[in-house]
Structure formats: C-alpha cells, structure tokens
Amino acid sequence: MERQRVARQANKQERFEQVKASLSHGISPKEIAQRLAMPVRTVYRWQKREVCPAHRPQRKLQTDKQERLEQARALRLRGLSHKEIAGRLAIGVRTVQRWLRQPDGTTNQPQRKRRSIFDPYAPYVLSRWQQGCRESRFIFQEIQKQGFKGSIRTVYRFIHTLRQGPVELPAPSVLDRVSVQEALWLIVRPFDDLELDERRNLLELCQTRSQLSMLHPLVQAFGQIVRKREGHRLEDWKQHVAESGISEVQRFVAGLERDQEAVLAGLTLVYSNGQVEGQVNKLKLLKRTMYGRAGFPLLRQRVLHAL
C-alpha cells in the first residue's frame, strides 16, 4: 500500500509539472486537459498553485486545525452555542461538537483500520498460500462456498501482497466475531440470560470500546425500570445519563422528558391502552384489505367475526 501511495504521488507530481510547463508556453487550460486526459477544473485549480497538491505541508494544516480548536474552546467558555461557534469559524456544527468532546484538547484521532468483509477469510487464504496453492481463482471459489460475498479482485490484491513478502495477520478481535446487531442484542438483554460465550463477547466489547462499558449499565438499569415498573428510579437514572456524557442516550432522555407524565404512568401503573391500540390496528388492517373489494355489509361481518 505504501508503494502504491508513493507511485500515485509521483504520477501526480509529473502531471502537475506538465500542466505548469504547458501553461508557461501559452497553451489554454482546455487544450491541456484534452492532451493529458484530465478534468479542466483540475487544470484551472492547479494553475493557481505553486506546489503540487500531493506535497502540501501537512504539518501546517494540522497547526491551523489546532488553532481553530483552541478558538472553539475559548468561544465555548464564553457561553457561545455550537451553532454560533461554527458560524464564526466557518466550520460545521458537527465538527465543533466532535472537537469539544475530545478530552485531550487535540484534533488528532487514532486511525482505525477499516473492517473488510474479507477479514474473516484472510487466515484461510493465508493457510492455503502456505500449503502451496497459488491459484487465486481456486481460492476465491473455496471461500465463496464458505460465504464470502466480495469480488475476486479482493483475493487478487491479498495474493499480490503475499507475493511481496511474509504477512502477519492480526489476532482476530471480538469485532470480527460479533456484528453490530449482535452487539446491540448483547447490551440490551439481561446479563443473567446470556450464555457463557455471549458474556465473554460482551466483556471483550466493553474492554475494546470504553463508551460501551458506560452504556451497558445504563441500558440494563432502564430495562429493569421498564420490566419491574420502577418509575420512581427514573430521575436517578436520568442523572446517571447526564453524567455519562453519551449524547445518544441523552437525546433519548430528552424525548422522554417531552412526555414526562405519560412515561411515568407507563413505568408505574399496571394499566395500559395496548389492548385498545391493538384493536384499532386490527380494524384498520381489515378495512384496508377490504378496500374496493366489497360493500359495507361484508366489512361489518368480518369485523364482528374478528372480534
């Protein structure tokens, strides 16, 4: 990957020099774009630059970014909202929110490896390579039978990497074993109902993502409030949510507060309008299935029979 990146930068530098040389000879940007088979907008953009975009000083960009973060923090201390800060600094509101959430006071974020659908099959492909199999098509057909949904180009790229030298695969993490839906289910279900391997996966998830270790007890506590109708604990739970700093759960609490009385009644009383809502839904379903097919007498008969 590093060789490809260097090759792309060298190619971009060469084309940039060709554009600059052509412009110095009085050739129009449109003609240059046709000669080099590149967008004319790129030629116009490069015309205004002295340095190739592939070699821009990244340190200067990072310094400017850090200065803007410090300005955002200073404006926040003065009481300005996220929207007002974004307007003054000409950046997005979500960028302001993300910067102000970072406790270390920097804009640097650790680069995370993007997960690929090929990752679960990489150990098998590596083992087949070590066994002497060099045919990418055969290996592709084998992992297809195991459930691989990607293209053969992915296998080609991995085999090409193996030809360059030995490859060490990272140890499979819990993120490779557990999907997003399975992780949500592990967090929502009562801990006592989980199997041993599910508990192990949940603990690994909480160790991998620090926010999950704070989210899990909040979800479990709210589930217990709902199941046992312990509405008197709701205020304490909301206080814990406010202290957690998890914005998604805080937005959920804001929705609860918009209908506070109904929420407390639902979490305290044994009465429910679920039966009424179910009957209304059944009536609407019968009406829609009968629309344009028969008259009112048959609809009346079906409704009474359903009741």
Image: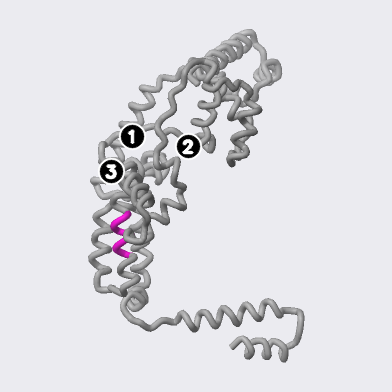
Find the distance from the CA under tag 3 to the CA under tag 1. Answer: 16 Å
Which residue: 33% across, 68% down? 257
Give the image quarter of residue 101: top left
x and y, in percent, of residue 187 in the image: 37, 55
Q: Nearer the viewer, residue 249 or 123?
A: 123
Q: CB of mark 1 within 8 Å of CB of mark 2?
A: no
Disc 2 packing (10 Å; few <14; some 14–19; many ≥20): few
| Numbered circle sitting on residue 302 | none
Q: Which residues are magenta?
A: 216-222
Q: CB of mark 3 within 8 Å of CB of mark 1?
A: no
The amino acid type found where label 1 is placed reads Thr
Q: Nearer the viewer, residue 228 or 124?
A: 124
Which residue: 60% across, 25% down? 156
Disc 1 packing (10 Å; few <14; some 14–19; many ≥20): some
Give the image quarter of residue 222: bottom left
The amino acid type found where label 2 is placed reads Arg
Residue hosting label 2:
115
- Label 3 SS: helix
x and y, in percent, of residue 122 in the image: 51, 31
Residue hosting label 1:
107
x and y, in percent, of residue 102 in the image: 30, 41
- Which callout, 3 or 1, points at the residue further toward the start of the chain? 3
| Numbered circle sitting on residue 75 | 3
Find the distance from the CA under tag 2 to the CA under tag 3. Answer: 37 Å
The amino acid type found where label 3 is placed reads Leu
- Which callout, 2 or 3, points at the residue further toward the start of the chain? 3
